[in-house]
């Protein structure tokens, strides 16, 4: 199949592009390289350096059958400081892609977010759970989902939104607001001490990027909808550090900093629909995924 992967030079997008190339698809990566890196684009995929807000020329040249939309303004802090910019990229960019895909009858698989949409989760959040985004970033992702649903109703399209848990793995950016796994392992690889904000009891649903890529490709068989992609297991930051010790063989001694305003205490997702509709379950155990991620960061540091 002919596929476009937006954000395919970034973390999750490059793994999706790699999986597509691996099964023999024709893969085109659309990325403006504002945060992605060209070296992340797998051999066999063609890179188009383009802004998602102006994708028409690339789409008309490629004539995609499916679009995996992983590009985003992904910083919560930036979304709070620059909500107009956040909406331009995450909302208007998604609308531009929907319209560019429509003449080619291309399906869009949209990367959304669980934690930033559901807010605090006392129990694993199902897709029907209350949506309580705490930031413009979460709101912009939710708006993107609604645009997909509107296009499905209006144009009879088959677009799918996937609400990811806390994705981790090789190639994740360890700077800025990157996931805690990348930040901690890079600090360890550089000989430093990771910082735990608060007491470390905060819980997240950590899902390995390879499992996420499998679910993302499998979503093309659906005729629309919203699905969680996660493990359904809550892991505290302290438990995560223990797993990192085992995975790295290092005696990791984290520092503690003050609680950060707006941090969720617990975010965990229900994956029942993905199990049923995609016949998908995560395969990579946390410690195994951390071992793969550590191999990447320790090599990069070396």
Image: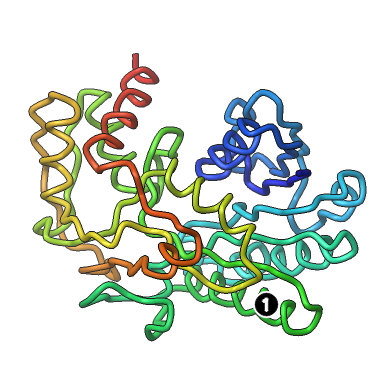
Foreground pick, 151 / 272: 272
Q: Name the residue: 44% across, 73% down.
A: 135
Position of 128 compared to 34: left or right?
left
* 70 shown above or below 266: above
* Residue 279 image point, x, y percent: 45, 58
Q: Looking at the image, what colour scheme do you see? A: rainbow
Position of 145 compared to 181: left or right?
right
Residue at disc 1, secondary structure: helix
* Residue 259 image point, x, y percent: 18, 63
Q: Name the residue: 21% across, 69% down.
A: 265
* 108 shown above or below 123: above
Q: In which quadrant will I find the N terminus?
A: top right
* 34 shown above or below 54: above
Foreground pick, 10 / 33: 10
Q: Name the residue: 24% across, 63% down.
A: 260
**Residue underneath mark 1:** 147
Residue found farthest to the top: 302
* 154 shown above or below 101: below
* Residue 221 image point, x, y percent: 63, 59
Crowding at mark 1 (Cα within 10 Å: few <14, some 14-19, many 20+): some
Q: In which quadrant will I find the C terminus?
A: top left
Number of labels in the image equals 1
* Residue 72 image point, x, y percent: 59, 56
Q: Name the residue: 90% across, 50% down.
A: 57
Position of 161 compared to 274: left or right?
right
Foreground pick, 54 / 114: 114
Q: Would you identify the image quadrant in which residue 296 lies?
A: top left
């Amino acid at each position: 199949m002919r596929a476009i992967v937006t954000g395919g030079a970034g973390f999750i997008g490059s793994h999706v592009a790699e999986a597509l190339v691996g099964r023999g698809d024709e893969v085109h990566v659309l990325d403006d390289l504002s945060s992605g890196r060209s070296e992340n684009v797998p051999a066999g995929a063609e890179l188009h350096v383009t802004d998602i807000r102006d994708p028409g020329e690339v789409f008309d040249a490629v004539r995609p059958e499916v679009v995996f939309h992983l590009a985003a303004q992904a910083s919560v802090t930036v979304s709070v400081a620059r909500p107009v910019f956040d909406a331009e990229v995450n909302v208007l960019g998604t609308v531009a892609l929907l319209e560019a895909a429509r003449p080619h009858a291309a399906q869009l698989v949209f990367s959304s977010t669980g934690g930033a949409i559901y807010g605090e989760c006392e129990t694993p959040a199902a897709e029907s759970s209350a949506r309580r985004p705490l930031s413009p970033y979460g709101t912009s992702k939710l708006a993107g989902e609604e645009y997909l649903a509107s296009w499905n109703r209006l144009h009879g399209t088959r677009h799918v939104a996937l609400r990811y848990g806390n994705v981790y793995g090789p190639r994740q950016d360890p700077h800025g607001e990157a996931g805690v796994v990348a930040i901690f392992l890079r600090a360890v690889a550089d000989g430093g001490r990771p910082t735990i904000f608060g007491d470390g009891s905060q819980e997240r649903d950590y899902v390995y990027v390879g499992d996420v890529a499998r679910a993302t490709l499998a979503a093309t068989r659906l005729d629309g909808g919203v699905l969680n992609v996660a493990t359904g297991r809550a892991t505290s930051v302290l438990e995560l550090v223990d797993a990192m010790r085992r995975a790295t063989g290092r005696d990791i001694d984290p520092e503690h900093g003050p609680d950060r305003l707006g941090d969720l205490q617990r975010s965990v997702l229900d994956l029942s629909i993905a199990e049923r509709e995609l016949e998908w379950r995560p395969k990579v155990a946390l410690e195994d995924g951390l071992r793969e991620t550590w191999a990447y960061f320790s090599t990069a540091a070396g």
